Image (spheres, rainbow, N blue to C red):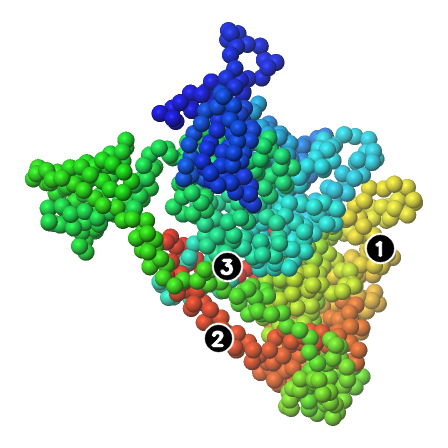
Amino acid sequence: MIKVYLRLLMLMCSFSLFAQDYFPSNSGVKSDNSNYKAFTNAKIHVSPSQVIENGTLLIKDGKVVSVGKSVNLPTNTTKLDLSGKSIYPSFIDMYTTFGVTKPKRGGNGPQYRPSRSGFYWNDHIMPEQDVMANFKYDAKSASDMHKLGFGVVNTHMADGIARGTGALISLNNDADNSLRVVDGEISQHFSFSKSVRSRQSYPSSIMGSMALLRQMYDDAKWYANGNVDTRDLSLEALNGNKNLLQIFEAGSRANLLRADKVGDSRNVQYTIVGGGDEYERLDEIKASNATIILPIDFQMAYDVENAFLASTLSLSDMRAWNQEPHNPRLLAENDVQFALTTHGLKKVSSFKSNLIKAIENGLSKQKALEALTTIPAQLLGKSNMLGTLKTGSYANFLITSGDIFDKKTKLYENWVQGMQHVISDMNVKNIDGDYTFTLAGSDYKLNISGSASKPKTKLESGDKSLGTKMNYSDDWVNLTFKTADSTKNEFIRIAANVANENNLSGKAIMPNGAEYNFFATKALKDEMAKKDKKKKGTAKDTPYMSPITYPNIAYGYEEKPKAETILFKNATVWTNESEGILENTDVLIKDGKIAKIGKNLSDRNAKVVDATGKHVTAGIIDEHSHIGAASINEGGHNSSAEVTIEDVIDDEDIDIYRNLAGGVTSIQILHGSANPIGGRSAIIKLKWGEAADDYVYENSPKFIKFALGENVKQSRSRTNSRFPQSRMGVEQVFIDYFSRAKAYDEAKKSGKPYRKDTEMEVLVEILNGERFISCHSYVQSEINMLMKVAEQFDFRVNTFTHILEGYKVADKMAEHGVGGSTFSDWWAYKYEVNDAIPYNAAIMHNAGVVTAINSDDAEMSRRLNQEAAKSVKYGGVNEEDAFKFVTLNPAKLLHLDDRVGSLKVGKDADVVLWSDHPLSIYAKAEKTIIEGVTYFDLEKDKQMRQAIAKEKSELMNLMLQDKNKGLKTQPVKKKEKVLLNCDSMDSGY
């Protein structure tokens, strides 16, 4: 009766609440109802840190009028007694697409120019997009959110790199948009993902997206300063929205840090939508100073009953299942601010169970409530109206049966802007629990759950479980169940009244029509509590969590290794210097450098390694690699000089560890060969376990990838539509871009205002000798062509990589001053390499060309010492010079030979201890050391293999326990690691 009365009052109030005064009305005499509503005797959570026992909440016209222990109630107040119940502020979801139709994908085929005029030159930049133009209130989705406790959502169009504005919407099913829209322009949204509505090819990679965002900000600044004569509605909107909350959808820990890197470069502080794996690098996440909008889409356990399939599971996937629920707790413990979101959930209804799981894994309830109320309100700039129940705030609140984060708590009502949304009738008696009864001489145990909405029952008699069907309405239970005799298809029917919440009484009708009095007794709360305690046993407060390693995959370190003082004794030392190979010699490593080389060395603080019968060399350097990167090609344009591999270093690539096991200490990660002018390189040391940016050489030489031949003229392309389409066209691309760069440099040096263009800035560095070219090459005619283009613009090519016809033009290469980094014996894998020979390296070397052997392959890079040995067979190169092909010579090509590539006092201690002659197929790298830190140790590797097997077994046991509890599992799907190469394109672009 109270419920009906309240609804009638609210309907009357709505005429005054929702009508806009300036609208004409022909409804007759106007009559306003200005009643107050008071919710009394409740436990009121005014905010996460303020709780009032037996308090009163007074609301009027959709706002909180007063809240407290003792509130003066006006005479025209409707009161509702909430004794034994709790009130919480409604939740806020900062990141949704509520009410916005998912955009449809555009046509097929590439598009190289924008499809719009008067807007930015790239279709994927759409800051002018107004979400309200595509918004339609969705009452059904709102009701789903009501059930989870949400009262307000921030919604946007999740399409494009710059996505336009978001709007803050109250989930008020009884209003219209004039009241629901709290703020029509609350935020500006970004991502790394292109718009599905445009076919514009650029960007085709995540590093391209990063470069585009940087250029967008530079262009916006140029436009804002009045340097453009034409209108650009996109840049106008971007500048106009710069004071809004800037939200970036990253979706993973790695992309979160990349987004923050873009923001830092242009003085923009993003609030970033994470991926739930932030725990892997908490120090870096904290250092970003970003507030995170945190999804809680936890993985299900894997079904590991099939031992063969289970053996294919990676440790990283198993850890993710175990560690993800701890992520909110770890962020909170490290003072990283976050708001929780339903984003990313396949089913929004799983939000509460995942939230409770996070709390079970150590997230405090106060932090959880903050992440759903006060923090999102603060970030949105609406703390004065949302997130608490303080005087003047919106009357957005929840009425619950108790602690909102308890599994058994019922959410009765979700009030939004003072309007009631009933989730579960609070006047319905709660009959959930365990009951016992005796009927016709048989004892029964009955469990009822979900009685307020969809009742579920379990009935047992002795050791038999009986099928049941139950209906609960108007305090009457109608229960039908099969008899215990499975040979007969007979049923017993019960009609029982809920006299109180502790027992059921009524009639039972047997299969033969006989009637019996029925009485079921409910177990008391303390008995149920004992039962729950018995179920939980002696479990720890916080469930087991696998240790986080660096990186957080197999073979990661629980603690990052540190530099040591190491003394190798009695080794065969390959110096790569004029001293040559030294027998029975000692090498002292100290403070990350080669400290001494000689005989009978000592250092009392050194860790002594007996290297008798073993070989010590400089670390191997791979001039051409594609491991350790999340992205290789930006092929959307024929020039992508603006992108850099340094943006997309993958610090979790297991091939980094595998390369260390092969004695590799440094690599150049090159852009692919999708276009004539590729992206900038990342020259890194394989510091396994360090953060991505810490892999990059300090004061790294500047390199860029160029390419010639079949790849860039798209010989195997299906569309075959991007310029150039011929080898002649490739030459014209170079001439055109360098001519433009020369003109750009002149404008820059003129002192007049100029539009900053990152692509041109990079090409100018080449013209000025500040950046060096590594060029993918095969055919002699094209090799000659690029050298002539370089001489035309007064610079030289640094390195031809692959260079399988280098033996044909070795004299010209030596004259130009270009080096060659080649394969040892690859040929005939495509048409333009038909003339390759295994003597290529020896011929170039003998002609005076600085020659290296590279891998361009994640497998080959693990055995570059053996690739170098082939030059002894093919061409008779002496062993020392052959080993320099993978150590000192690539260091020279990379302008790093003053730091690495040889064993010389003062150089970086990038050192390998080999079990045998380093050119032998039997040689193993026993220790691989970078700057005095041992990143690979053969003996430790054996120990790690055992530890990995043990951890996987422990995690499988936990997964089996989950399945035995009846929890859902996911099937094991074998994953094949994709090895990136020159042709690799980003998936999803």
Q: Which residue lies furthest to the right in this view?
A: 750
Question: How dense is the environment of label 3, judged by Cα within 10 Å: few (below 14), some, or many (20 and up)?
Answer: many
Identify whether 897 is placed above or below 208: below
Say what amino acid the circle numbered 2 marks. Gln
Q: Is residue 294 left or right of residue 960?
A: right
> What whole-number distance in Å separates the C-alpha atoms at marks 2 and 1?
54 Å
Q: In this view, does 587 lie to the left or right of 168?
A: right
Q: Which residue is drawn at 62% across and 77% down?
A: 866
Where disc 2 sits, the SS reads helix
Say what amino acid the circle numbered 1 marks. Leu
Q: Which residue is drawn at 79% across and 30% down?
A: 230
Query: Mark 2 vs mark 3: which is more N-terminal?
Result: 3
State the quadrant of the N terminus. Answer: top left
Q: Mark 1 points at which residue?
A: 767
Q: Name the residue under label 2.
A: 946
Q: Residue 323 carries which label?
A: 3
Query: Mark 2 vs mark 1: which is more N-terminal?
Result: 1
Q: Residue 535 carries which label?
A: none
Which quarter of the picture shows residue 271? top right
Residue 602 placement (x, y as % from top left): 73, 89
Residue 448 placement (x, y as % from top left): 28, 44
Identify whether 139 is placed above or below 968: above
Which quarter of the picture shows residue 519? top left
